[in-house]
Amino acid sequence: MDEIRVKVIFDRERIATRIKELAVEIDARYGQEPLLAVCVLKGAVFFFGDLVRILHNKNLELDFVRLTSYGMDDASSGAPILTKDVEADIYGKHILIVEDIVDSGYSMRFLLDCFAARGARSLRLAALVDKHERRQVDVNVDFAGFAVNSGFLVGYGMDWAERWRMLPDICEIVPG
Ligand code: IMP
Ligand code: MG
């Protein structure tokens, strides 16, 4: 495994700059409206931490879900499982889901439908990376960090078979 190499595609400064821009958009959208921000573990953990700490909304609640669909593979099974649910009640609330990557869209379609069925007042999605061209089901990313069309990304929370999450930059696995 150790021969696998990665190369930086968005470095930590670029990530921080982009997250500040997203925070401005999110603040403009919600102002001081009560908002429940839901982090999708594990991949979004650093994105979520960096984002929510610079929002100006003083009526912000934080919660966490864990979704699994990939296992040790790098292709979506298309059948996500909610292995950890939010503790908060979703009913009647403005919800902002914070995810690392939207790829096929199956995971976020599942979570959006799940929260819609629980009666969320509004539902929006922030994703650090939008692999828009790989979409299999309709999912709109309301606040997208970076658009990427190909390659497998690791670092800044994102993993390949649980490796590389701790890298401070967004990197791509170098094939070969
Ligand atoms: P989707 O259900 O196909 O949209 O898959 C979304 C999930 O797959 C994301 O939450 C990621 O955890 C994972 N994923 C998709 N592409 C990548 C990647 O390039 N690197 C790491 N994880 C990825
Ligand atoms: Mg994920």
Image: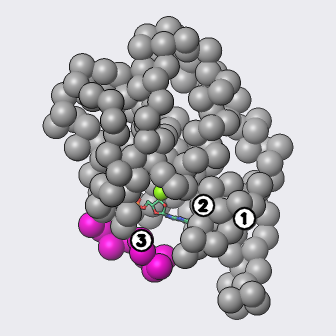
Q: On screen, 53 above or below 162?
A: above
Cα gap from disc 1 to disc 3, whole angstroms: 19 Å
Asked if the residue under mark 3 is in contact with the one under mark 1, i.e. CB atoms within 8 Å, the reply is no
Residue at horizontal 70 percent and vertical 29 percent from the top = 20
| 136 falls in the magenta region | no
Tell me if the residue at label 3 has its CB under 8 Å from ligand 1: yes
Residue 81 screen position, x and y as percent? 29, 61
Q: Is residue 95 visible?
A: yes
Residue hosting label 2: 158
**Sequence-earlier tag: 3 or 2:** 3
Tell me if the residue at label 2 has its CB under 8 Å from ligand 1: yes
Q: Main secondary structure of the magenta part?
A: loop
Q: Place residue 173 in its image quadrant.
A: bottom right
Amino acid under disc 1: Cys
Element assignment for label 1: strand
Residue hosting label 3: 70
Q: On screen, 66 above or below 79?
A: above
Residue hosting label 1: 171
**Sequence-earlier tag: 1 or 3:** 3
